[in-house]
Amino acid sequence: MTLTRNLTQQLFGLQSCIGLTVLVCLFALTGCDGSPPARFHLNMVAQSKERVDEANQQQVADILTAMFGTPDNPFVLPETGLDINKLRRAAGPVSSDKIGQRTGLYREHCVHCHGISGDGMGPTAAFLKPYPRDFRQGVFKFKSNALNAMPTDEDLMRTLKHGLENSAMPSFEVALPPADLEALAEYVKYLSMRGQTELALIAQVFETVDDDDKDKRLLSSSREMLLDTVLLPIAEQWQNANDSVVRPEEPPADFGSLASIEKGRQLFFGNKGGCVKCHGTTALGDGQTTDFDAWSKLVIDAKAAAEGTIEKQPGAREALSKKIAEFEARKNKVGKAEPFASPEAEQEAKDSIAEDEKTYVENEFFSHMQLRAIDEFSLPPRNIEPRNLRMGYYRGGRRPIDIYYRLATGIYGTPMPGIAGPAVTTEEIWNIVDYVLAVPLEPGGQLGADRTMAARERN
């Protein structure tokens, strides 16, 4: 409680004592039925991967609470640019106010898939393919701007309105009014910004915490560090999302013609487009089948790091035992062992053994804790499957411009690269769009003639 109070005072100054009182009181609240209030979970895969100790995990949790509040009572700094009224409409338990306006929208419509923390681990997540999106990395696949940019508000609204075809993400355009959709889009940004802030704090622990300096054993909670170093760069990415929106030239005059489709087909199967590598020689999505997306790679990398350390432990134990035996022989002048030249040399060797023992014990403990955290706080990684274009499903939207975005900039967090550049012109990208839209109509496609792919001449 004291730590959260201090953090809040540093962030907002003493003039914010009213807001502080509200924030502190949140810790004493419980639900109407006596159950504890909903709470955000730390990103334990990332925390474990970087071996953040328990004290700094608590520090990170307290900082996040001071900066973002709780699931029932969200709070944001003005620097985030987030609309607190929209967040309050989306957050909290499902209910209605006196005039019938619904609140708790996220918990009503989204939490069963995306989870209370936006980690993509809601109660139904494990049964879905693809898994629901984990918002916390700030990685979004279907956007209208640069590959690594944050999505625009329009991008988020489009996904909420129309859903993601051939996935469990439904369309809410008919079910919810525009104000509710805007509140949900704002809440997705809030969860993502909070998750990105946690990752930035973890990086700061890794860079600045010093176990040998008692004054630097905990992550700094100064206003300069929390705002200037951590939050502002993240907020600016979201606020600048519109600056990198892709605005291509109009499609060529022959767009939609057989000639344009044929040009696109040649580019698709040729080296210039490079589409065959993943989508296969028949566009069935059977090119590569062993890669992973960014969300799975985080889990895989964290697990590999822990398992790699465990594999090295027998060798480390043997080396430590040998080092201890050599120390004892030198200390007791056994056999041909060279005695220590001075008490200082003996102490130095003793300290070296103590450091190696500490490292060995920490590796043994943290590596097994890492594996436990990864198994508990993540879903089993799945290989990412390139789209089977013959099925006629376009998860990011079926408008020609939607497919243009995917081709030009790529799909963030996946192996799908962008091809826009000197080697591939805007007109050629439009030609490939033409062909991609025509693939389901070809023989062997879902909408094509009733003829098997075996009977089709392979490209």
Image (cartoon, rainbow, N blue to C red):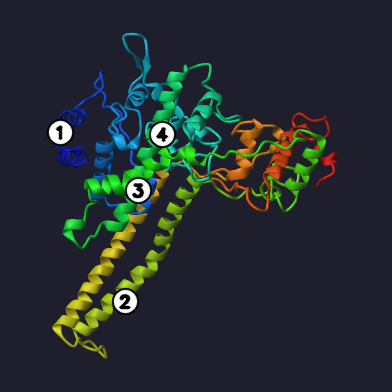
Location of residue 405 (image quadrant): top right
Q: Nearer the viewer, residue 152 or 174?
A: 152
**Which residue is located at x 35 percent, y 38 percent?**
194
Query: Circle 2 sits on which residue?
Result: 322
Q: State which mark lies toward you, 3 or 2.
A: 3
Location of residue 342 (image quadrant): bottom left
**Which residue is located at x 31 percent, y 57 percent?**
207
Where is 173 relative to 28, above or below?
above
Q: State which mark lies toward you, 1 or 4.
A: 1
Which is nearer the N-term, disc 3 or disc 2?
3
Q: State which mark lies toward you, 3 or 1.
A: 1
Q: State which mark lies toward you, 2 or 4.
A: 4
Whether residue 331 is visible here, answered yes or no, is yes
Query: Circle 3 sits on which residue?
Result: 200
Whether residue 57 is visible here, answered yes or no, is no
Q: Position of residue 199 (x, y in %)?
A: 36, 47
Q: Amino acid at mark 1?
A: Gln
Cα distance between the residues tagged 4 and 3: 16 Å
Which type of secondary structure does the marked residue at label 1 adopt?
helix
Q: Amino acid at mark 3?
A: Ala
Q: Nearer the viewer, residue 46 or 435?
A: 435
Cα distance between the residues tagged 1 and 4: 28 Å
Query: Circle 4 sits on which residue?
Result: 189
Cα distance between the residues tagged 2 and 4: 54 Å
